[in-house]
């Protein structure tokens, strides 16, 4: 159809003269061809063509369209009051450039129509509609008025009828599209559209009938009837197009998602370029000065931009950043205007001073102006860019991507502080607010704490009260100062005075499922000074919802962990308890047995020597001491556990504590056959400690040294200063402690798994005690040991305690 169409346009015949209306008749105003120069002249009034009286220029075109180029047609003209008939040889009506442009533009539409269909899945109504719009426009262009009597005659007639069909249906398709793209607008739209399709169909049938009745045979009155109806169609066309455009603009205003807006921006850009340039370059200049600013060919080319933008919008709206295009064109138009103004300013100022320009002075002035302008260009461009960014383009971010990233990342956080830090970082980067804070119940879950924030580190009590009052769940989950929000966002009005005092503009509560408010997200105004948009608020709402569920998840995890730890502790304690009972009873049993045994000996044996008696009594005394140490250890451990152990500090000589301990341990040491070396300092070390506790620690260490030595029975006890500490050190040559056990021996109830050691008995409380005592004095206890060759335990006590 298109190819046949372009053929009939190419063979369109006519006269190369400009015709105008003057006093209701058709007058020749300009003759553009040398061939008819001698036959027709300016101011000739055309009365009839080929025997048909004509009253409009369209009548002439209609008649001539039935002839071929080169055919002779009789024209009846009135020249100087006389009527004369002049046979005129018809020429080609269209220029070759026009034909080429028509062909190109027609092809562009056609190609777009095909491409869109190829790129998008079939079955998408929007794509189908756009496809048909492109095809009908393309057909409309190709089958524009040409010779309708080409052979075979049916072909010429059909092309005209197809043209009418295409031009009738295009606006309805466009209107239809505007109801569906980017999303369906109105549930009942199809009733209207379907009605319109039916009306259009009958209109088209009627037009086809009128046309046919005007051409066979050619009848001017019938043609006039046809034209009247054709003009009705033009109105229909205009109304449908305007409604479609209004529909698109309205969709844009109502669009919620950034993606939709981007799509619509392409559409609107397309609509702006096509019709806008048509009006400004073609229509208005013609009305004002009767000459168009650009030839029809250029106009046609520009019109092809519109479907291109539509195609981008429908198929690949993201290939180019539409905002970027808008942004850059705004910037450059502004910069160019500024630069031109500066340039003219410089030249004008120079003119005032110089008076009359000579060639030389004008070269100098323009050179200077050019240099200044060149130097100013970059700074001006940057400043303008900043201005435009700030004024017209809010912080650009892709809403969808931000949301997706947020959703996938938030699950990685398992504690409140890092969660808050993440949320604040994300929002800070996306919205760039002047300040932001994440107040929420911390791990205590009783009080709001600042978990994370920028430029904001405490919550003033006034604000706190305002926020606390905001606990009604039925209220809008957004409290804001209205001046900082774009219109169309629903919110709860904030206490403006308090908000402003704290430099925040909006607050969003973090509502937990348990209907409990666990905190707030507070934001200051944006650094860019732009308002919070609907997308921003949507993003914030998503963030808040996801954050609250993350908080809930974290709470649940913490509860579970606590429960788990508690059960484990109870189990452990149970195990320890039975172990403790058995080992302590064993430890109590040994000294009790010997006490009982020697006491019985003293009772029953009559002839005991004085020496023996003394020895028995010493044993009883020593074993009782051991018993009481053991019981002391247990008691003291239980005091430590309950947190009731107290230390009474007094200034004492460390050496004498050691000596006292050795005195009480004498029996045990000697009985076990130990060799003891004592190294005391020359000068007394006076230190502020609880003497009894230190003695207790030392006793425990000595006890262990005795207990865990085998053949090598040698112990060295030394007391000395080292840096700022006083040190009590006990070195034995016993079995030693393995590297692995060294870390654990200070824990309560720990006993090495070694069978030999297990056999020795013990509650595993001695070293725990020592460590507690050391720490209570701000000191520490260390062990150096090698299994098989002995251990050295050192108790460090800071000396400044003496002050
Ligand atoms: P207990 O001696 O009642 O087992 P302690 O807390 O005093 O409890 O000691 C814990 C563990 O540390 C002991 O079971 C033992 O394995 C190890 N240990 C303590 N002192 C020494 C030492 N001087 N030589 C070797 N091992 C020791």
Image: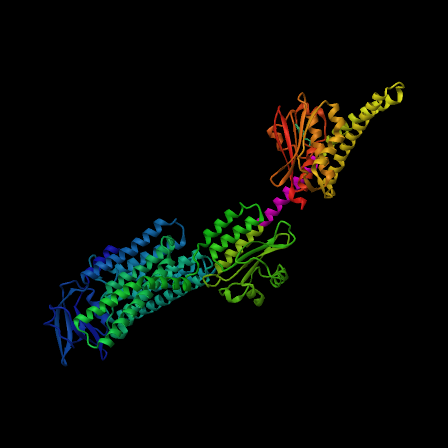
Quadrant of the image occupied by residue 665: top right
Q: Residue at x 36, y 65 (%)?
A: 241
239, 752: nearer the viewer:
752
Does residue 258 appear in this view? yes
Q: Where's residue 473, x and y in %?
A: 62, 59
Quadrant of the image occupied by residue 751: top right
**Dominant secondary-structure state across the stretch colored magenta:** helix
- Tell me: residue 158, above or below residue 496: above
User: Is residue 431 toward the left or the right of residue 769 in the image?
Assistant: left
The colour mode here is rainbow
Which quadrant of the picture is home to ligand 1?
top right
Which residue sits furthest left? Answer: 38
The quarter of the rendered structure image containing the N terminus is bottom left
Which residue sits furthest front? Answer: 682
The magenta stretch spans residue 667:
no
Which residue sits furthest top? Answer: 607
User: Is residue 148 toward the left or the right of residue 588 in the image?
Assistant: left
Q: Where's residue 287, x and y in %?
A: 28, 74
Q: How many marks?
A: 0
542, 660: nearer the viewer:
660
What segment is highlighted magenta in the picture? 550-573
The magenta stretch spans residue 555:
yes
Q: Where's residue 458, x and y in %?
A: 58, 58
Q: Where's residue 792, x and y in %?
A: 63, 30
Does residue 575 appear in this view? no
- Tell me: residue 116, above or below residue 95: above
User: Is residue 664 toward the left or the right of residue 712 in the image?
Assistant: right
């Amino acid at each position: 159809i298109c190819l046949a169409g372009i053929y009939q346009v190419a063979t369109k015949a006519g006269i190369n003269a400009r015709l105008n209306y003057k006093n209701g008749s058709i007058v020749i105003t300009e003759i553009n061809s040398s061939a008819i120069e001698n036959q027709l002249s300016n101011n000739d009034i055309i009365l009839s063509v080929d025997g048909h009286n004509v009253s409009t220029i369209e009548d002439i075109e209609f008649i001539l369209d039935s002839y071929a180029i080169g055919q002779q047609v009789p024209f009846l003209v009135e020249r100087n009051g006389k009527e004369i008939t002049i046979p005129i040889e018809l020429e080609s009506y269209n220029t070759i450039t026009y034909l080429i442009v028509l062909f190109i533009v027609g092809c562009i539409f056609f190609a777009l129509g095909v491409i869109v269909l190829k790129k998008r899945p079939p079955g998408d109504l929007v794509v189908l509609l756009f496809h048909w719009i492109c095809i009908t426009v393309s057909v409309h262009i190709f089958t524009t008025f040409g010779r309708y009597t080409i052979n075979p005659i049916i072909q010429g007639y059909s092309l005209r009828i197809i043209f009418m069909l295409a031009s009738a249906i295009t606006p309805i398709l466009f209107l239809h599209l505007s109801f569906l793209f980017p999303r369906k607008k109105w549930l009942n739209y199809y009733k209207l559209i379907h009605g319109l399709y039916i009306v259009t169909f009958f209109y088209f049938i009627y037009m086809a009938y009128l046309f046919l009745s005007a051409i066979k045979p050619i009848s001017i009155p019938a043609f006039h009837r046809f034209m009247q109806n054709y003009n009705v169609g033009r109105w229909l066309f205009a109304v449908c197009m305007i409604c479609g455009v209004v529909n698109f603009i309205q969709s844009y205003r109502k669009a919620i998602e950034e993606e939709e807006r981007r799509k619509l921006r392409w559409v609107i850009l397309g609509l702006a370029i096509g019709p806008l340039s048509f009006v400004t370059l073609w229509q208005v200049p013609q009305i004002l000065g009767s000459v168009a600013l650009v030839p029809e060919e250029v106009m046609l080319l520009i019109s092809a931009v519109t479907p291109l933008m539509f195609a981008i919008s429908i198929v690949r709206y993201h290939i180019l950043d539409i905002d970027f295009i808008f942004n850059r064109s705004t910037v450059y138009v502004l910069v160019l205007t500024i630069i031109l103004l500066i340039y003219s300013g410089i030249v004008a100022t120079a003119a005032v001073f110089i008076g009359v320009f000579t060639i030389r002075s004008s070269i100098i002035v323009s050179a200077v102006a050019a240099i200044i302008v060149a130097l100013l260009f970059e700074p001006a461009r940057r400043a303008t860019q900043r201005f435009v960014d700030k004024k017209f383009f809010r912080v650009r971010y892709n809403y969808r991507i931000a949301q997706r990233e947020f959703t996938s990342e938030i699950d990685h956080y398992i504690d409140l502080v890092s969660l808050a830090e993440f949320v604040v970082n994300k929002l800070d980067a996306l919205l760039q607010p002047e300040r932001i804070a994440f107040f929420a119940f911390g791990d205590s879950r009783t009080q709001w704490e600042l978990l994370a924030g920028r430029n904001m580190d405490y919550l003033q009590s006034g604000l706190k009260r305002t926020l606390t009052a905001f606990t009604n769940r039925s209220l809008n989950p957004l409290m804001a100062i209205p001046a900082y929000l774009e219109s169309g966002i629903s919110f709860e009005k904030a206490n403006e005075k308090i908000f402003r005092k704290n430099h925040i503009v909006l607050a969003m509560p973090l509502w937990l499922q348990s209907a409990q408010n666990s905190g707030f997200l507070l934001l200051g105004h944006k650094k860019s000074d732009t308002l919070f948009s609907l997308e921003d608020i949507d993003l914030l709402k998503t963030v808040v919802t996801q954050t609250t569920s993350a908080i809930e998840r974290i709470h649940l995890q913490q509860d579970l962990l606590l429960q788990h730890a508690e059960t484990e502790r109870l189990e452990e304690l149970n195990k320890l308890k039975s172990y403790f009972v058995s080992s302590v009873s064993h430890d109590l049993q040994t000294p009790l047995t010997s006490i009982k045994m020697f006491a019985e000996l003293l009772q029953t044996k009559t002839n005991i020597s004085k020496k023996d008696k003394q020895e028995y009594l010493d044993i009883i005394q020593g074993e009782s001491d051991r018993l009481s140490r053991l019981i002391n250890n247990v008691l003291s451990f239980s005091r430590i556990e309950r947190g009731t152990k107290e230390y009474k500090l007094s200034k004492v000589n460390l050496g004498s504590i050691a000596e006292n301990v050795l005195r009480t341990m004498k029996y045990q040491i000697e009985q076990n056959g130990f060799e003891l070396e004592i190294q005391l300092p020359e000068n007394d070390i006076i230190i502020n400690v609880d003497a009894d506790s230190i003695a207790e620690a030392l006793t425990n260490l000595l006890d262990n040294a005795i207990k865990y030595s085998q053949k090598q029975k040698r112990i060295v006890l030394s007391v000395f200063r080292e840096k700022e500490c006083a040190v009590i050190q006990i070195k034995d040559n016993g079995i030693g402690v393995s590297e692995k056990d060294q870390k654990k021996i200070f824990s309560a109830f720990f006993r090495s798994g070694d069978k030999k050691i297990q056999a020795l008995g013990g509650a595993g409380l001695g070293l725990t005690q020592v460590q507690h005592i050391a720490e209570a004095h701000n000191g520490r206890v260390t062990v150096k040991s090698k299994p098989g060759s002995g251990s050295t335990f050192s108790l460090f006590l800071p000396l400044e305690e003496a002050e």
